[in-house]
Amino acid sequence: MITYVTMLRGINVSGTKKVRMQELEKLYQGLDLENVRTYIQSGNVVFTSSHSDADYLAELITKALYKEYTFDIPVFISTATDLEAVITRNPFLQRHNIEKDKLHVTFLQHAPALQAIEKCQALTFEPDEFVMDDKVIYLYCPNGYGRTKLTNTFFERKLQVMATTRNWRTMNELLRIAHQKLGLA
């Protein structure tokens, strides 16, 4: 069995695209996904499956969500191992004065074009910082994510790729839940 984490983009935001977590768990279970557990109302789901094709699972979940809710919900999927690597590779953790509650991770649905990456990396929005790493963008927003210009919309426009962002506490909690599913906690 492989432990996966999915992050749904854009649900339960400002009263739109409402999805109850209890219903979401049942939907996943109906897809023969096991050990399903949600975390907070923003569409984070940890589960296990014998399927080794993450793209297949993302498509399966996407179709089931559309059938159930009749609106598109982008699904970002990662294995627990990949999520752990994302957390471990965060370049901002190397700094001594970093406030961890100001860290965020933006996931991209696929790797952007090199030209778009180069244009984006040339931009600065001090004091906010970002570091791109394939399909992941590490953010440090000292004044808070609510005040940054480095939002999903910003990266989607600049990189022409769908994005979703999670704060550092959520990232670590998802990994903790995933480790429980793996029997490592």
Image (spheres, rainbow, N blue to C red):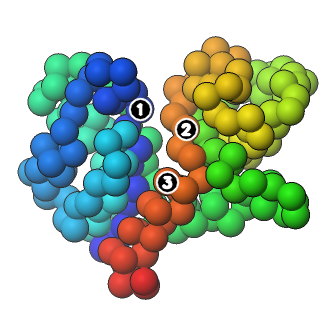
Residue matched to label 1:
9
Which residue corresponds to mark 2?
A: 165
| The N terminus, quarter of image | bottom left
Neighbor class of circle 1 (other Cα within 10 Å; few <14, some 14-19, many 20+) is many
User: In the image, residue 173 lies at what x, y percent?
Assistant: 47, 62
Q: Position of residue 86 (x, y in %)?
A: 63, 58
The residue sitting at 36% across, 21% down in the picture is 14
* Of the image marks 1 and 2, the number of the one nearer the N terminus: 1
Inspect the image, locate mark 3, and give the three-letter code of the amino acid beneath it.
Answer: Thr
Q: Is residue 118 visible?
A: no
Label 1–label 2 contact, CB within 8 A = no
Q: Which residue is at a point 23% across and 61% down the rendered structure image? A: 36
Secondary structure of the residue carrying numbered label 1: loop
Residue 97 in the image, given as x and y percentages of width and height: 86, 58
Q: Which mark is residue 143?
A: none
Under mark 2, the amino acid is Thr
Depicted 108 relative to depicted 28: above or below: above
Looking at the image, is mark 2 or mark 3 earlier in the sequence? 2
Asked which secondary structure carries label 3, the reply is helix
Let me know if residue 9 appears in the view: yes
Left or right: residue 47 compared with residue 30: right
Relative vertical location of residue 88 with respect to residue 7 in this rendering, above or below: below
Report the front residue among 84 and 11: 11
Mark 3 and mark 2 in contact (Cβ < 8 Å)?
no
* Amino acid at the residue labelled 1: Arg
Secondary element type, mark 2 = strand
Say left or right for 67 vs 73.
Answer: left
- Residue 39 at x, y = what percent? 34, 54
